[in-house]
């Protein structure tokens, strides 16, 4: 025991000393003092000749000093001691390459591959040695030689995929990654991430071609159709993706989860037809017992509504059919806190599109009084109910409901929204000072939308309050704003025209024109909307509404007036002439998409 303690202490001291020397050698090497680092690394290697790192750093130090003869002598000596260490031939080849002796270098690299043994770890070590020297072709050769020795074509397929990725050889990269997927299907998500990071639009076509070929040869491999559905999603071809996930759902007798997830993705990207088809598939095939049944019914309804009402492109018959579907849903599931959100959507449909305010008010009053209703849903119902009271000019009822939500959700976005609408109500009533004070507070809202709208209205009031001896022009404009909100378009036009007649060439002229464009949009008179927006662009290019008008006119030509070239021209004009506009980034993106760029 007495003898053992000094030995332990000696070994500990020796280990500490070696660690200190290693840190010192590393410091010298990093600082370019290769003479010193070579001496220490050689010393460390002599103490531990199994440590390849010390040997490699010793050789690298000598090469930096161009002492190539010493390098060769040390490598040859080490090869005699450890002939199975094929990485030494890579080191030897690197020494030759530093001397621009490419033939001799390649001979050593080839020798390393030829002398590989049937050992997986040795293959990986050799390939990594080549990778460190960015010699990807030799690394590939090492893995391919290792596969033959181990009689396993798949064992290094993932490594080969990575090497072909580095080389930029997409077909072979895909081939090997797919081989690796056969060997280990759990790699699917990693491979998706890699593809998403490095693929161009054309690369997805190559992947699809290889997947179709493999699916044809091996119909049992589930990871291929799953990956194919992912490819379709990346290409925003949700219809084709739905075919794949539906087939997988049927084949494995799943519960509809992957179909439900795809429906949500398609809906978010406004492919309403695919979203509706996916949700209805779950409803029809899984039945009421499915955990996704109610959500799918609701999802189908939501997307049918969005498809019909988006862009004001709908018929009364379509709206009535949608109303009946909502009523059918509520007949099936009843009216309670569970279905309150559907009742809320129906109420908005009745008010905004079927123009039946009394029915929508009745539905919203019903929601508010549901027992144990979710506080947020109740608040949403109160906000909508307040809006509809305002549309009927019941000002007191509206402000009372806005105030209730504001008080109940003081620091919440719902509270901010209620406060904003209440402030806007004061603006409609020409109480401009109080409204502006509220807008100034709301500029600090965490909601970017509320904050921006509050800032715009605050600036708008401030700009137009002190321009004249009277505030009548602003009162007329606010009155017209309220009439537009109430969908009383003829009355709004009359007030706006009165403003222009009484105050010709007033600074509000561009705002008046912009309000008229909004009326034409709501009336779905898109040609007239385009005419008014064009007047703003031509006659009020320096005013605040000019960039809004440019962007909206471009969107109008793109989506409603079927003139993509004109839309592209307007988007380009916006981001060039109004580079500081909040619309500039979106305009540039839309311009590039219309031009056909791969974004």
Image (cartoon, helix red, strand yellow):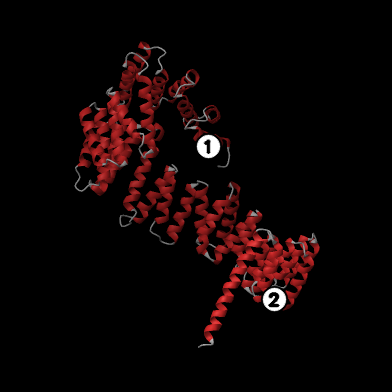
Q: Which residue is mark 2?
A: 84
Residue 261, percent from left and from top: 41, 52
Q: Nearer the viewer, residue 540 or 201?
A: 540
3D distance between C-alphas at marks 2 and 1: 58 Å
Image quadrant where residue 468 sits: top left
Callout 2: 10 Å neighbours few (<14), some, many (20+)?
Answer: some
Residue 440, percent from left and from top: 34, 31
Give the answer, above or below, for where 491 lies relative to 316.
above
Q: Nearer the viewer, residue 397 or 57?
A: 57
Give the answer, above or below, for where 290 lies relative to 361.
below
416 with respect to 23 (left or right)? left
Give the answer, above or below, for where 146 lies relative to 578.
below
Q: Is residue 108 visible?
A: yes
Query: Which residue lies at the image location 50% right of the left edge and 46% below the top edge?
Result: 236
From the viewer's perspective, is the residue at label 2 or at label 1 nearer? 2
Secondary structure at badge 2 equals loop
Instruction: In the rendered structure, find residue 589 and report the number of the disc placed on it.
Output: 1
Callout 1: 10 Å neighbours few (<14), some, many (20+)?
Answer: some
Image quadrant where residue 526 sits: top left
Image quadrant where residue 155 sits: bottom right
Secondary structure at badge 1 equals helix
Q: Nearer the viewer, residue 11 or 242?
A: 11
Query: Which residue lies at the image location 38% right of the left edge and 49% below the top edge?
Result: 279
Residue 189, percent from left and from top: 50, 58
Instruction: In the rendered structure, find residue 389 and report the number of the disc placed on it.
Output: none
Residue 524, percent from left and from top: 40, 27
567 with respect to 378 (left or right)? right
Query: Which residue lies at the image location 62% right of the left edge and 65% below the top edge?
Result: 24
Which quarter of the image is occupied by the C terminus? top right
């Amino acid at each position: 025991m007495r003898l053992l303690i000094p030995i332990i202490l000696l070994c500990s001291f020796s280990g500490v000393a070696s660690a200190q020397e290693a840190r010192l050698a590393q410091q010298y090497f990093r600082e370019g003092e290769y003479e010193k680092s070579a001496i220490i690394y050689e010393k460390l290697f002599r103490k531990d000749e199994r440590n390849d790192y010390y040997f490699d750093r010793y050789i690298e130090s000598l090469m930096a000093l161009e002492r190539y003869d010493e390098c060769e002598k040390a490598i040859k000596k080490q090869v005699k001691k450890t002939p199975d260490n094929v990485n030494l031939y890579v080191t030897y080849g690197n020494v030759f390459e530093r001397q621009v002796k490419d033939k001799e270098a390649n001979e050593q690299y080839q020798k390393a591959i030829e002398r590989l043994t049937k050992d997986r770890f040795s293959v990986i070590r050799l390939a990594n040695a080549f990778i460190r020297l960015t010699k990807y072709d030799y690394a590939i050769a090492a893995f391919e030689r290792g596969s033959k020795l181990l009689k396993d074509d798949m064992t290094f397929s993932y490594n080969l995929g990575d090497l072909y990725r580095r080389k930029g050889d997409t077909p072979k990269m895909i081939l090997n990654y797919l081989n690796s997927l056969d060997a280990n299907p759990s790699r699917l998500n990693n491979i998706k991430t890699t593809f998403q990071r490095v693929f161009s639009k054309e690369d997805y076509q190559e992947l699809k071609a290889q997947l179709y070929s493999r699916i044809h040869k091996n119909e049992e491999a589930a990871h291929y159709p799953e990956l194919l559905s992912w490819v379709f999603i990346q290409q925003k071809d949700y219809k084709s993706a739905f075919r794949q996930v539906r087939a997988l759902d049927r084949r494995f007798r799943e519960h509809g989860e992957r179909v439900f997830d795809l429906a949500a993705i398609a809906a978010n990207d406004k492919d309403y037809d695919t979203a509706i088809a996916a949700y209805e598939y779950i409803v029809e095939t899984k039945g009421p017992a499915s955990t996704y049944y109610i959500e799918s019914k609701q999802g189908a309804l939501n997307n049918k509504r969005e498809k019909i009402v988006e862009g004001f492109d709908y018929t009364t018959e379509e709206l009535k059919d949608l109303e009946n579907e909502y009523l059918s849903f509520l007949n099936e599931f009843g009216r309670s806190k569970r279905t309150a959100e559907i009742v809320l959507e129906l109420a908005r449909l009745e008010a905004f599109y079927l123009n039946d305010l009394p029915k929508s008010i009745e539905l919203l009053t019903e929601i508010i009084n549901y027992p144990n209703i979710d506080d947020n849903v109740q608040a949403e119902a109160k906000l909508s109910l307040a809006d509809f009271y305002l549309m009927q000019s019941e000002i007191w009822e509206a402000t009372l409901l806005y105030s209730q939500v504001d008080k109940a959700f003081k620091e919440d976005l719902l509270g901010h929204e209620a406060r904003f609408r209440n402030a806007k109500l004061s603006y409609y009533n020409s109480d401009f000072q109080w409204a502006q004070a509220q807008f100034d507070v709301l500029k600090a809202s965490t909601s970017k939308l509320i904050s921006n709208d509050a800032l715009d209205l605050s600036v708008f009031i401030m700009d137009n309050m002190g321009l004249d001896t009277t505030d009548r022009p602003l009162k007329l404009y606010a009155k017209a704003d309220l009439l537009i909100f109430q969908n009383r378009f003829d009355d709004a036009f009359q007030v706006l025209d009165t403003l222009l007649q009484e105050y010709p060439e007033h600074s509000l002229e561009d705002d008046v024109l912009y309000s008229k464009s909004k009326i034409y949009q709501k009336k779905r008179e898109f040609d007239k909307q385009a005419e008014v927006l064009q007047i703003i662009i031509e006659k009020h290019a320096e005013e605040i509404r000019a960039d809004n008008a440019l962007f909206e006119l471009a969107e109008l030509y793109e989506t409603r007036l079927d003139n993509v070239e004109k839309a592209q021209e307007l988007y380009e004009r916006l981001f060039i002439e109004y580079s500081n506009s909040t619309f500039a980034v979106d305009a540039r993106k839309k311009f590039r998409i219309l031009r056909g760029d791969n974004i």
